[in-house]
Amino acid sequence: MILMKDIYKTYANGVTALNGISVDIKQGEFVYIVGPSGAGKSTFIKLMYREVKPTQGTIIINEIDMSEIKERKVPYLRRDIGVIFQDFKLLPKLSVYENIAFALEVIEESPRNIRKRVMDVLEIVGLKNKARFIPDELSGGEQQRVSIARAIVNHPKIVIADEPTGNLDPDTSWGIMKTFEEINARGTTIIMATHSKEIVNTIKKRVIAIEDGLIVRDQNRGEYGYEI
């Protein structure tokens, strides 16, 4: 599913974000990425959907060698990867329905399929009655559910979530985590970067800890392991 081998990433300003990491993530796993700020977590996440390229090393996603993929093929690769951000990144003037449908329109899905799939994912995230609302009319938790729906509407094999509960209150965060667990139970691989010690220690999953650009811990049903 996701294989990284001897990955190094040094940016143009000379900062080395990753310093020779290797990891293997199987289909259907739920993995937390943890570590202090500046450890290399964001770079690790961005490598998976080709937002950045490694300086050195091999990355294989869904049996595709990322070092050999042509730039024009990257959008096709991303159809199998849903990405969820801390700040939602919703289009403010579009309705909930339109925000989610947009992800299918760009790949020229038929209007009939778009309607069915959008309504299906709205039901999964519990927002079927909010389809006509615009983002400003929703709570933070509801906006995050819309971003989750948009990420999964394409039935991706992998969902990458970068601090998805970072801007949410605790009660809302637990609801979002329940949604992630339900998506994972359907067979989708979830990779989630987080600073939430309580979530990691309560909802036990695989934990990969990154410090100074290195993987220092990789545990099944692990704990957060850092003081906040």
Image (cartoon, rainbow, N blue to C red):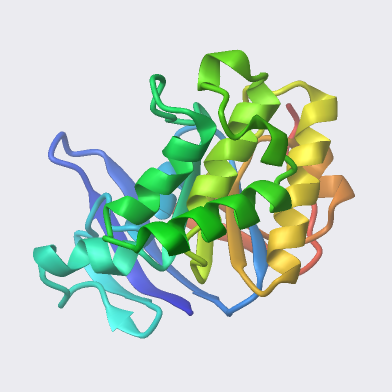
Where residue 124 sits in the image (x, y, percent)? 71, 53
The image quadrant that residue 25 belongs to is: bottom right
Residue closest to the far right: 202
Residue closest to the far front: 112
Residue at 35% of width from left, 63% of height from top?
110
The image quadrant that residue 120 belongs to is: bottom right
Image position of 104 with respect to 113: above or below: above
54 sits left or right of 193 in the view: left
8 sits left or right of 159 in the view: left
Where residue 22 sits in the image (x, y, percent)? 44, 71
Where residue 68 sits in the image (x, y, percent)? 15, 77
89 sits left or right of 169 in the view: left
Where residue 156 sits in the image (x, y, percent)? 49, 66
Labels in figure, total: 0
Residue at 74% of width from left, 50% of height from top?
179
Image position of 104 with respect to 37: above or below: below
Can residue 210 be spotted in the picture?
yes
Residue at 56% of width from left, 29% of height from top?
132
Residue at 67% of width from left, 29% of height from top?
142
Q: Camera-side residue: 2 or 120?
A: 120
Q: Camera-side residue: 32 or 154?
A: 154
Residue closest to the far bottom: 63
Image position of 208 with respect to 174: above or below: below
Q: Camera-side residue: 18 or 182?
A: 182
138 sits left or right of 196 in the view: left
Can residue 43 be spotted in the picture?
no
The image quadrant that residue 143 belongs to is: top right
- Quadrant of the drawing holding the C terminus: top right
